[in-house]
Image (spheres, grey):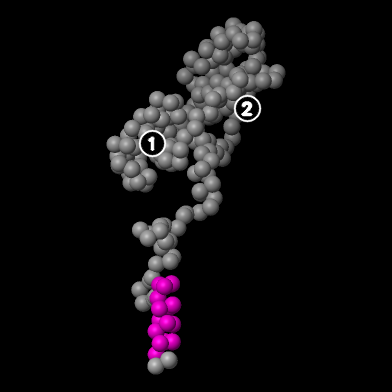
């Protein structure tokens, strides 16, 4: 069974993109960027929260600076019968386990864990093995992280970023490139000047 995809408009997509980049951005700043009143932006954010599109707000902490510099992925096999949640719940309750994924294949769960060092990781693995339904584990230690993010790709915003910044529209509906620069004429003015020269020539 697949999850139901919620339909949203371009304004909601822009708001989600800004909050995903910086959850502390002020409603007034969002309102300025999407050209809406702050009260309307607040109401949209509240509805996005109610619909489950915004699950919460949290700070990204420096794991290494806080003494949790070692990251590892642990594959766990269990003796659980299919559909039994007991082992998964026990794994998720461990504070050093950041992610628990029920996976297909020979293993049952994939964990993302943090530890201070290899000794701390060894203690964590012993705690995992102490769970009665866990039959075996396989561990891969991360040497270097090239990318780690919780951000989701937002299709409309991704396409805009690839296309580059849009040309700014003027009140007349023309782009800034079409406006007259100091000391230059606009597109309409050369035509008027040409007509004036023709009138002088006929006289």
Tell me where residue 11 appears, x and y as whole percent.
42, 40
Q: Residue at x 47, y 54 (%)?
A: 165
Which picture quadrant has residue 77? Answer: top right
Classify 75 as above or below 10: above
Q: Residues within 10 Å of mark 2 (few under 14, many from 20)?
A: few
The label on residue 157 is none
Tell me where residue 166 appears, x and y as whole percent.
46, 55
Chain part drawn in magenta: 186-200
Quadrant of the rendering where the C terminus is positioned: bottom left
Q: Earlier in the sequence, mark 1 or mark 2?
A: 1
The label on residue 140 is 2
Tell me where residue 47 appears, x and y as whole percent.
38, 29
Q: CA distance from mark 1 to mark 2?
A: 32 Å
Confirm whether the magenta stretch covers residue 191. Answer: yes
| Residue sticking out furthest to the right | 106
* Residue 21 shows in the view: no
Towards the viewer: 16 or 167: 167
The label on residue 23 is 1
């Amino acid at each position: 069974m697949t999850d139901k995809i919620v339909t949203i408009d371009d304004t909601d997509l822009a708001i989600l993109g800004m909050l995903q980049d910086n959850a502390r951005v002020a409603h007034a700043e969002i309102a300025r960027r999407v050209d809406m009143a702050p009260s309307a932006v607040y109401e949209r954010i509240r509805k996005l929260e109610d619909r489950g599109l915004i699950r919460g707000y949290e700070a990204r902490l420096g794991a290494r600076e806080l003494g949790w510099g070692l990251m590892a992925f642990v594959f766990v096999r269990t003796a659980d019968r299919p559909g039994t949640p007991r082992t998964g719940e026990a794994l998720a309750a461990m504070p050093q386990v950041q992610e628990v994924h029920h996976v297909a294949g020979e293993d049952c769960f994939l964990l993302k864990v943090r530890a201070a060092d290899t000794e701390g990781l060894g203690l964590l693995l012993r705690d995992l093995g102490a769970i009665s339904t866990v039959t075996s584990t396989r561990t891969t230690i991360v040497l270097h992280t090239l990318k780690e993010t919780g951000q989701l790709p937002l299709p409309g915003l991704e396409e805009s970023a690839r296309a580059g910044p849009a040309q700014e529209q003027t009140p007349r509906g023309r782009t800034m490139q079409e406006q007259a620069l100091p000391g230059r004429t606009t597109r309409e003015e050369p035509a008027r000047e040409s007509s004036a020269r023709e009138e002088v020539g006929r006289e």
